[in-house]
Image: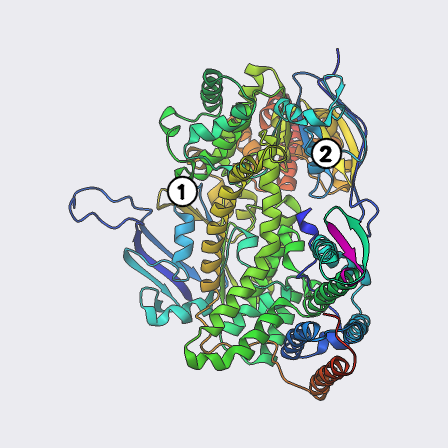
Amino acid sequence: MTPILETQELCYTYGVETPFEKKAVQNVSIKIEQGDFIGVIGHTGSGKSTLIQMLNGLIRPTSGKVLLAGKDIWEEPKKIRAVRFRVGMVFQYPEDQLFEETVLKDIQFGPRNMKLTENEIEQRARDAAKFVGLPDELLDKSPFELSGGEKRRVAIAGVIAMDPDVLILDEPTAGLDPAGRDVLLSEIVSYHKIRGNTVLLVSHSMEDVARVADRVLVMNASHMQMFDHTAEVFAHDKELESIGLQVPQVTKIMAELKSRGYPVETCLTVEQAVAQLLPLIKKGGDRV
Amino acid sequence: MEFIKAENVRFSYDEPDEEQPDKPVHEVLKGIDLSIERGEFVALLGHNGSGKSTMAKMFNAMLTPTSGKVLVDGMDTADETHTFDIRRQVGMVQQNPDNQLVASIVEEDVAFGPENLGIAPAEIRRRVDEALKVVDMYEYRTHAPYKLSGGQKQRIAIAGILAMETACIVLDEPTAMLDPRGRAEVMDTIQKLNREKGITIILITHYMDEAVQAGRVIVMDSGTILTQGTPRDVFAQVELLKTHKLDVPQATELAFRLHSAGCGLPNCVLTIPECVDALELLLTKKGAAQ
Amino acid sequence: MTRDIALGQYFPGKSPVHRLDPRVKLVLTIAFIVYIFVANNFWGLGFLALVTLGIMVVSSVPVKMYFKSMKGILFIVLFTSVLNLFYGSGKVLVQIGFMQITDDGIRNAIFIAVRIVCLILFSSILTFTTSPTELTDAMERLMSPLKVLHVKVHEISMMMTIALRFVPTLLEETDKIMAAQKARGADMESGGLMQRIKSLIPVLIPLFVSSFRRAYELAMAMECRCYHGGEGRTKMKVLHMEAMDYAVLVFGGAVLVVILLLNHFVPAVI
């Protein structure tokens, strides 16, 4: 099957042939399958923002290709807008982009740009609002009256309403409190399950990535460091630490126990760790 | 010595409705009592809307209680003749690093506070240099703030308060908009100020791993103090925290779950090494008992 | 990108130009701008261009920075000089339909181009070698006699400081919001003028909203830092004139004399 999104030797350099030339992304080749949930991690400045903006055609690569369902997105530069509808992008602090009089109108902005019928626009906006848990009574309010968490949901709904094949979210939970973060994350997970589309989640929170992602892409110093199943990536705790990234606390604890000779496997969540440790403690920790 | 004291502080952003005196006013703070000693490092923890940021603004007279009293070094914050003196004692750093820097050059921004205090130029120079050295930004003194990272900007904001030589710094979610590296930089700086300079720190946060670093944790929920004590005492109450939309570090949660399942684990561990050691002790003890 | 705008950027350094009293620099910049328009022939203008180049060298700001500051203005320079090409009488060199290019026109075009370039370069020297705070400080001090007339001199200079500080922040934010709206399919590149203006609404409204929030937060931060207007305020960097500053002022006066002499003894161009 053709991957939904593929990059071939993707490179981007800022300010080519000026004294300020800076390589932001170098030789990234990845294949993302339909329905994948991918976590993207890396430092600020590792190139991950530039990379994701190339995936939906906001930045044109200096060299290399982005293939959407097997087709080079820059084959017809005039039609790049159509690519942006299929690869939806939610930026960091997306609530800063709200501008319409009502929440509903703001969510409709994307679908309206797609030139859908009025009925479809309405339907998609309402569906999207449901996915992010926005109650109907909020839809006629001004987005500027809402709380921070609600605004964030409106902005995400605005992208979901375009019904993209690939949804990219850059730090969707930044600045939210723990409860807000958990709720939003589980909404994204259930959206992914119901729609069956592809999601890329950029996050600084290893705990969040470990909990929701099937595969993890690690960016470091403009290169792709790793791209593998979540458990595989977080099993490399030493390598991640060497590039200044952490692994989730619980993964670290289990890795430490393993290195001290206890028969435990890589864990990504507290639940997994409890499930492994309980029987072990009950029968006594025989070292291997 | 008691430095800051809050007595039954109530606060509401709305004015009571004169036509409908019975209509309940939404209170953000509902009778807060607390006192903070000189040199303490206190973390004020709570979810969004718990009233923690409103409380923070009480400490330097940015807000004054609707009823009740806040005393800073014996001065009532409601007395406007003291406002200036209170802000000389209690500085504040806010969440968004971009929106609190005034000048286009780092050192000139740090000088802004002391300049307002009317300090002599040579002394300002000395304070600015020293403050920038403390936050480890001296080499950036002639840079433009907008080119720096979030963590660096936040450290400059801290230097700006340091140069005023306040006895206390209130930080209102200073790391909420930073990446992990920036968060670590800012937390290290805060620790240093408290330990080496003896500056009283009041840290408003919703990150548990930051609260763990404080000497005392005060948990707020819907305008009241839910619980307070050392990080160990507070984080032992995992269930209480969870029901109030708060989170505990994974190490703490793991130990708590195993403890609840009847394993002989201490019910409160705070850090990864602590957790690993406790688990190992448990595993080897059981192994030996067999 | 909008971020590349070099105009109004400070380049920290220790050159003699950097160390001059900002008041002197400000006064001389204004004086030079006047000189540029006083000079009415190539000799005077050439002399000014030479002086400008000399100061540029002494300023030790990389030449590429000056080029960068010219880049944004290039269009205006070309536009005005092309416009001037078609004015003026004299010997007709080229005839395009009803328009004609004369030797006077060419001379005018070059003259105007050199004028604008000098203007930009000279103001760039000021902004490259003077920090925004120094600049607003100088303004505050120079305008302080106006206090008698109840002009809020301190407030004006504080406003300028803040405006200068937030220009790059707002430009960055504009980039960000534009990208976000493009990601939602906003089309800002096609359509007629009205449509283009309309397509800016999704960028301008969020920008206004965030600017208000920033203003509110900044005001709070300033209050927290004991800001209470200009009363009783001191400055870390005190301005005081030294021998060098007086010498430079005298030099500025001498340049004027040279220009006037050249104007008088060499025939004017326009």
Q: Position of residue C167 (x, y in %)?
A: 59, 56
B42 left or right, relative to C190: left
Q: Is residue B49 visible?
A: yes
The answer to which of C9 and B137 lies nearer the viewer is C9
Report the magenta residues as a range. Answer: C99-105
The answer to which of C94 and C155 lies nearer the viewer is C94
Q: Is residue C46 above or below residue A77?
A: below
The answer to which of A143 and B114 lies nearer the viewer is A143
Q: Is residue C30 above or below residue B47?
A: below
Q: Which residue is mark 1?
A: B49
In the image, what residue occupies the spot 75% across and 10% down?
A1
Q: Chain letter for mark 1, please.
A: B
Q: Position of residue C20 (x, y in %)?
A: 70, 79
Cα separation, mark 1 vs mark 2, equals 36 Å
In the image, what residue occupies the spot 44% across and 64% down?
C223
Q: Secondary structure at mark 1?
A: loop
- Indicate yes or no whether the magenta region holds residue C101: yes
**Number of numbered discs present?**
2
For the C terminus of chain B, the quadrant is: top right
Q: Residues within 10 Å of mark 2 (few under 14, many from 20)?
A: many
- Dot 2 amino acid type: Leu
Q: Is residue B268 visible?
A: no
Q: Which residue is mark 2?
A: A51
Q: Position of residue C32 (x, y in %)?
A: 69, 75
Label drawn at residue B263: none
Q: Chain letter for mark 2, please.
A: A
